[in-house]
């Protein structure tokens, strides 16, 4: 055992990725369906008695957890390749268990469709997490405005529609901040409400537009998704539908960033360029060439120089790519400045990057980087999903061997990442257990 390993934050019995860095990547990386879209599309299945076929599902532990939660409520779930069929006909319960929901914060947005379908829902309050406090005040406030009585007791949010035969009532709602989860929760709730709901100051993320796409395919009447105001005219019932999840913009962004960090030309496909506008602009500002080719993008890094970036709600720079982008900026010539404005505790990867030789100082929510010629491999641990992806990017770029722990986070958002990176020339392998498959999650 080396001295570095003795000082390591990594439990050597835990599964890890072992990366021999400084290898040029070459070829094409395929982007899977978007995790954050797929999760909310699955929740939307609760709104209908019909069968919802969702294609392009990513094979991830979070998706497996959501499937288990839905099955526990009585929703039928069948998987065939990358398609899933969810049937809400047998939905009998409105109270997902704490044991399942605690594994998946996003499951809280089930409160909207459950309330719309049953007039009652009891969902565990998602606590804070490593990246921040993750409140759900906007979700609850909106549901209350639509006629739900909400009480919070013993960590459970109980919601019930009083009067109006258990049906939510459309109304005008102004969100204090454009929360993605609140927008999705309220959109789903409003599809079956009586009358019109107008949601102001909503999230404009592509996943919100994707949800509107599925809901419309199910017969919902929705206008304005992708803008700051969405209006929904409630209908009595939604029917089955067939729908495909959009490509994962965060996965695509991670691959483009990995290419830039290893100074490699790589083709990443499929990508919807509009979903990644702020990220592509930043990569170009840094000195990367980006050209559309077929359904994807080819990135060609040139002489890179430091930049300034600030995370913002869409169409701004996504907070979910802040950590991987920081890993890239550590070896870019000159100074860079990163301001994290969305989550209050999302700079924990700084300490791990410093272990690899990165020159980074933090002042509150700002990280100031002084580019170094090269990182050096070290044992590191990812503290959340995207921070772990950042460690992989850093390991690919670093000189020597990097061991990355925290794979339970990574596997929530990236399917068999090491196999896909190996195929484009990375020297990366998993030590310990292999990634669990969808329904074994
Ligand atoms: C979603 C994404 C997550 C991404 C985040 C921001 C899913 C499953 N997850 O999370 O990957 O990082 O959007 O793009 O889609 N806020 C409040 N009050 C509320 C709700 C939110 O102040 O009631 C604040 C949060 O503290 C945070 C900001 O709004 O500062 C964004 O949170 P939100 O958009 O709700 O994130 P999620 O939907 O949880």
Image: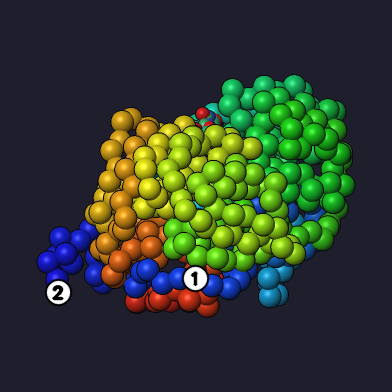
Residue 373, x across and y down, in percent: 32, 55
- Judging depth in this view, the residue of 256 and 380 nearest the camera is 256
Q: Residues within 10 Å of mark 2 (few under 14, many from 20)?
A: few
The residue positioned 80% from the left and 30% from the top of the image is 231
Residue 222, image quadrant? top right
Query: As drawn, is 30 to the left or to the right of 359?
Result: right
Q: Is residue 124 left or right of residue 242?
A: left
Q: Residue at x 59, y 22 (%)?
A: 176
Q: Is residue 340 visible?
A: no
- Mark 1, secondary structure of its residue: loop
Residue 49 located left or right of residue 413 = right
Rendered location of residue 381, percent (x, y): 31, 58
Locate residue 437, reporting x and y percent: 53, 73
Classify mark 2: helix, strand or loop. loop
Which quadrant does ligand 1 occupy? top right
- Please tell me which residue is depicted at 34% across the width and 47% down the height of the picture: 371
User: In the image shown, does 154 or 264 lie closer to the viewer?
Assistant: 264
Q: Nearer the viewer, mark 2 or mark 1?
A: 1
Report the disc number at residue 103: none
Q: Is residue 240 visible?
A: yes
Residue for badge 1: 25
How many numbered marks are there? 2
Task: Choose the circle earlier in sequence order: 2 or 1.
Answer: 2
In depth, the one of 277 and 83 nearer the eye is 277
What residue sits 63% from the left and 48% below the top? Answer: 276
List the single residue furthest toward the left.
3
Rendering quarter of residue 261: bottom left
Give the crowd class for mark 1: few <14, some 14-19, many >=20 residues within 10 Å: many
Q: Which mark is residue 1?
A: 2
Report, in whole angstroms, how far the alpha carbon at label 2 lies from the one at label 1: 30 Å
Left or right of 423 in this view: 290: right
């Amino acid at each position: 055992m080396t001295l570095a390993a003795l000082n390591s934050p990594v439990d050597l019995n835990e599964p890890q990725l072992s990366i021999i860095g400084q290898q040029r990547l070459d070829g094409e990386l395929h982007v899977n369906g978007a995790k954050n879209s797929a999760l909310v599309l699955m929740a939307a299945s609760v709104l209908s008695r019909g069968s919802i076929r969702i294609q392009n599902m990513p094979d991830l532990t979070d998706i497996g957890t959501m499937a288990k939660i839905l099955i526990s409520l009585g929703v039928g779930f069948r998987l065939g390749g990358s398609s899933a069929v969810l049937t809400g006909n047998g939905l009998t319960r409105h109270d997902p268990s704490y044991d399942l929901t605690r594994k998946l914060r996003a499951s809280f947005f089930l409160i909207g469709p459950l309330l719309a379908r049953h007039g009652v829902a009891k969902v565990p309050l998602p606590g804070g997490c490593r990246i921040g406090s993750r409140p759900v005040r906007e979700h609850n406030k909106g549901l209350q405005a639509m006629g739900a009585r909400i009480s919070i007791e013993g960590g459970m949010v109980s919601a019930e529609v009083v009067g109006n035969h258990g049906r939510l009532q459309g109304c005008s709602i102004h969100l204090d901040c454009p929360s993605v989860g609140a927008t999705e929760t309220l959109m789903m709730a409003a599809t079956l409400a009586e009358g019109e709901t107008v949601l102001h100051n909503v999230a404009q993320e592509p996943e919100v537009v994707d949800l509107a796409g599925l809901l419309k395919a199910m017969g919902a009447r929705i206008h304005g998704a992708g803008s700051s105001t969405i209006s929904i005219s409630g209908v009595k019932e939604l029917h089955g539908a067939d729908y495909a999840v959009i490509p994962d913009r965060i996965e695509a962004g991670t691959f483009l960033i990995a290419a830039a960090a290893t100074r490699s030309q790589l083709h990443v496909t499929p990508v919807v360029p509009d979903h990644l506008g702020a990220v592509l602009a930043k990569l170009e500002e840094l000195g990367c060439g980006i050209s559309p080719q077929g359904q994807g993008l080819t990135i060609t890094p040139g002489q890179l120089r430091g930049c300034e970036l600030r995370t913002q709600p869409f169409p701004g720079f996504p907070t979910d790519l802040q950590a991987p982008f920081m890993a890239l900026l550590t070896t870019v010539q000159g100074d860079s400045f990163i301001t994290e404005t969305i989550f209050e505790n999302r700079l924990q990867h700084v300490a791990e990057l410093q272990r690899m030789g990165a020159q980074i100082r933090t002042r509150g929510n700002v990280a100031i980087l002084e580019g170094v010629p090269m990182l050096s491999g070290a044992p590191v641990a990812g503290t959340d999903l995207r921070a772990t992806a950042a460690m992989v990017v850093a390991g690919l770029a670093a000189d020597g061997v990097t061991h990355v722990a925290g794979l339970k986070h990574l596997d929530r958002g990236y399917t068999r990442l090491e196999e896909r990176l190996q195929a484009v020339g990375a020297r990366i392998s998993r030590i310990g257990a292999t990634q669990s498959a969808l329904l074994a999650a």
